Amino acid sequence: MVIDVISLAVKLLRLGEVVVLPTETVYGLAASIKSGPALRKVFQIKGRPLLDPLIVHVLDYGWVPKWAHVDGLEERVKTLVDAFWPGPLTIVLQKKLAIPAIVTAGLDSVAIRCPAHEIFRKVLKAIKIPLAAPSANPFGCLSPTTAQHVKDSLGERVPLIVDGGQCNIGIESTILDMRASVPRILRPGAISASDIAQVIDAAVLDYSPVISSSAVPGQLKQHYSPNTRLVLVDAEKQLALLMNDPSREERAAFVYLKRPAECPYENDVFWLSDDGNNRVAARSLFSILQTLDRAGYDVIYCQKASPQGVGIAVNDRLTRAAAKFSS
Ligand code: TXA
Ligand code: MG
């Protein structure tokens, strides 16, 4: 009997296994929130500390009140999810007792998101249970945006990787804490503070690395790191200077924000987008870093995005990825 991949994923999840599923942001390592063994496997397989809470994925807003308190916030939450779900927005609410403590690392809040990728949605629709899913990479490493990235890093450790193509957004969801009267961005993503403020017609506290690192366990200064040394530069000109430095002995890759007009060392030159578009840069960021990390370079020099909209999220990931090399 031929069994389709969605049914197989659902079967494995029901048996207390983990499954890698595509989302529109990055690939996720999914477990049923009703399976203690599967949830423990998520932490083991990633090598992730139990102090780092997981995001709970739901099919639609209708699932939320069962797992989180929305009292007093319903109108605001509904307005938000009508605008952005399914999509790359995670909301943090007061958790209900039904959510196991391992999912939220013992916090009294829960992060909930409604993914847009059709494969993830089909699995949710069939299993009818929320799925906890962190990014499907070893803890602290680059996030995966293709099934091959997951195979290369977690490979044998997971029973099923469902290939849903390249992730369209390419960086993890925006996380918004909805519990305070002024909602606050805890992790920047493709949906910005101003996008949210416009929809709810109220102020939103933008992302601040200092506040966020104390408020969000797991939001580490150093994260998403390649093995190859990564050095960030602000402007295109600096890449040209490094490239033309006669004293440079290292084998270096140069990553521009947009395709450079002319360039003598074209074999080692890459770009995040053709025309400097931040959304395209976000989509290609992890993909390019994953490829270059396996290409035998001594160092990757990468230009930062322009700090608007999703460019803020791109620079957040780049800064954390470079942090382990700057101390
Ligand atoms: O786009 C995404 O959000 C992806 C895809 C797979 O859905 N998931 C993802 O999960 O990025 P992960 O585990 O790599 O990052 C989740 C982060 C945690 O590190 C933590 O900082 C934050 O979400 N988080 C989870 N629960 C939280 C909570 N109750 N309060 C505050 N932050 C929380
Ligand atoms: Mg992650």
Image (cartoon, rainbow, N blue to C red):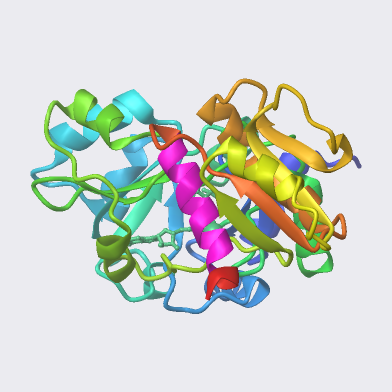
Q: Is residue 73 left or right of residue 94?
A: left
| Among the 4 quarters of the image, the one containing residue 287 | top right
Nearer-the-camera pick, 269 or 110: 269
Classified by dominant secondary structure, the portion drawn in magenta counts as helix
Q: Which residues are magenta?
A: 311-323
Q: Residue at x 16, y 34 (%)?
A: 76
Q: Residue at x 75, y 52 (%)?
A: 245
Q: Residue at x 53, y 43 (%)?
A: 304
Q: Position of residue 28 (x, y in %)?
A: 61, 52
Residue found at the far front of this picture: 246
Taking the magenta stretch, the answer to whether it contains residue 221 is no
Q: How many marks?
A: 0
Q: Is residue 178 above or below residue 125?
A: below
Q: Is residue 22 visible?
A: no
Assign the N terminus to one quadrant of the image.
Answer: top right
Q: Is residue 67 visible?
A: yes
Q: Is residue 209 left or right of residue 53?
A: left
Nearer-the-camera pick, 64 or 311: 311
Q: Is residue 207 above or below residue 275?
A: below
Q: Is residue 203 left or right of residue 119?
A: left
Nearer-the-camera pick, 124 or 120: 120
Q: Residue at x 56, y 76 (%)?
A: 40
Taking the magenta stretch, the answer to whether it contains residue 321 is yes
